[in-house]
């Protein structure tokens, strides 16, 4: 029988075995993290303080920004500390990080699906919009997303916490994701894998199906609009969301939907950087640059503040 400790220590390698440029990496990720916090908190502030943005679409956008801030905050501060200090972490800490990462990632999937459904109703049955998307329904959808993500993540992190580790525990990744843990363990992982390949896919697959069907209906409705003006107006209300969805699901599919023989730790890490750090940072900018109402609110707030100051 092999020896194992109940709460073994792990070394998170981060990106240090890929690149020696510690300071450059540190500055890069610090700037991306600060931009993420700045952009997303600006969106939340605008949604809360602007009467123009008091519609379900912007409530969801505010929630999306909140989730984006939280999900990177579970990863980047520890990662930045690791670039400088190369510290280790205990299994318990690792499982906690895995849990919160899963909660925020699943909630993001659900919110993207809710936003797609919201756009579907707004474009395909505009007359019934205020009846179908009530404030109560919005709040309920958000609560259900958080609760089901919390339960799902609890299940998976409890399963991960039963894994046993023997020997050298070096994680070739910048956070405790499921795949590197399954790579390292010396326990039998068949039950974990069974759970991941069955229930594990649902929080990605169900929202994806909702997004896909919503956009098929949206696009078939937009194509039928006669006037060019009407067409571009209808499309402009969902184009930012469409870009965010493509960015998010694109990288997730790139990461998980490929033959397992092509799994390499380095490739995994670089794709993970895109959907855990780069995409959440870009979301607020995509919405501000492409959305007239958000741009207007930003201008109004900024100009008003300056006016009061002088
Ligand atoms: C999130 O959504 C709920 C329900 O629609 C809303 O009341 C709340 O203000 C939103 N949160 C943010 C930060 O926008």
Image (cartoon, helix red, strand yellow):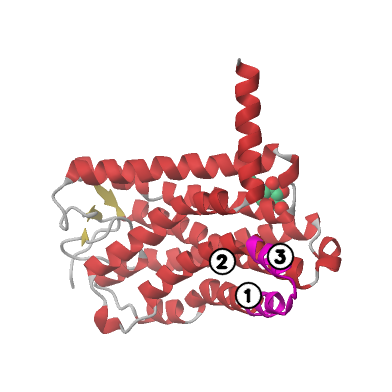
Per the picture, the main secondary structure of the magenta-coloured stretch is: helix
Q: Position of residue 69 (x, y in %)?
A: 49, 47
Quarter containing the C terminus? top right
Which of the two labelled residues, at mark 2 and mark 3, occupies the earlier sequence position?
3
- Residue 184 visible in this rendered orientation of the protein: no
Compute the Cα span from label 2 to label 1. 8 Å
Task: Work out which quarter of the rendered image holds the N terminus and state it.
Answer: bottom left
Q: Nearer the viewer, mark 2 or mark 3?
A: 3
Residue 66 image position (x, y, % from top left): 56, 48
Label 1: how many residues lie within 10 Å, few (<14), some (14-19) or many (20+)?
Answer: some
Q: Residue furthest front?
A: 228
Residue 8's x, y, as percent?
Answer: 25, 56
Q: Is residue 223 visible?
A: yes
Q: Which mark sits nearer the N-terminus, 2 or 1?
A: 1
Q: Is mark 2 within 8 Å of ligand 1?
A: no
Between the C-alphas of marks 3 and 1, the distance is 20 Å
**Residue that mark 1 sits on:** 215
- Name which residue lies at 50% across and 64% down: 153
User: Which one is in front in this view, the residue at disc 3 or the one at disc 1?
Assistant: 3
Q: Which residue is mark 3?
A: 229
Secondary structure type for disc 3: helix
Vertical relation: 118 (above or below) 74: below
């Amino acid at each position: 029988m092999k020896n194992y400790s109940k709460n073994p220590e792990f070394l998170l390698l981060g990106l240090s075995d890929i690149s020696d440029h510690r300071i450059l990496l540190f500055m890069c990720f610090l700037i991306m993290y600060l931009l993420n916090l700045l952009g997303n908190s600006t969106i939340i502030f605008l949604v809360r303080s602007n009467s123009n943005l008091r519609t379900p679409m912007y409530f969801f956008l505010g929630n999306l920004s909140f989730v984006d801030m939280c999900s990177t905050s579970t990863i980047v501060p520890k990662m930045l500390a690791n670039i400088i200090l190369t510290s280790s972490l205990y299994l318990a800490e690792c499982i906690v990080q895995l849990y919160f990462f899963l909660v925020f990632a699943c909630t993001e999937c659900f919110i993207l699906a809710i936003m797609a459904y919201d756009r579907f109703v707004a474009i395909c049955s505009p007359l019934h919009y205020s009846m179908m998307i009530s404030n109560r329904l919005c709040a309920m959808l958000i609560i259900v997303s958080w609760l089901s993500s919390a339960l799902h993540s609890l299940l998976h992190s409890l399963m991960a916490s039963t894994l046993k580790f023997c020997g050298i525990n070096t994680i070739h990744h910048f956070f405790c994701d499921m795949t590197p843990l399954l790579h390292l363990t010396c326990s039998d992982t068949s039950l974990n894998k069974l759970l991941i390949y069955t229930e594990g896919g649902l929080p990605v697959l169900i929202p994806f199906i909702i997004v896909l069907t919503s956009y098929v209906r949206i696009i078939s409705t937009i194509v039928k609009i006669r006037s060019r003006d009407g067409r571009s107006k209808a499309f402009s209300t969902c184009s930012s969301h469409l870009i965010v969805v493509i960015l998010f699901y694109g990288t997730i599919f790139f990461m998980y939907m490929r033959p397992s023989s092509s799994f390499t730790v380095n490739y995994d890490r670089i794709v993970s950087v895109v959907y855990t750090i780069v995409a959440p940072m870009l979301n607020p900018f995509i919405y501000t640059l492409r959305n007239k109402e958000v741009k207007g609110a930003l201008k109004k707030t900024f100009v008003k503040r300056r006016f009061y100051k002088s």
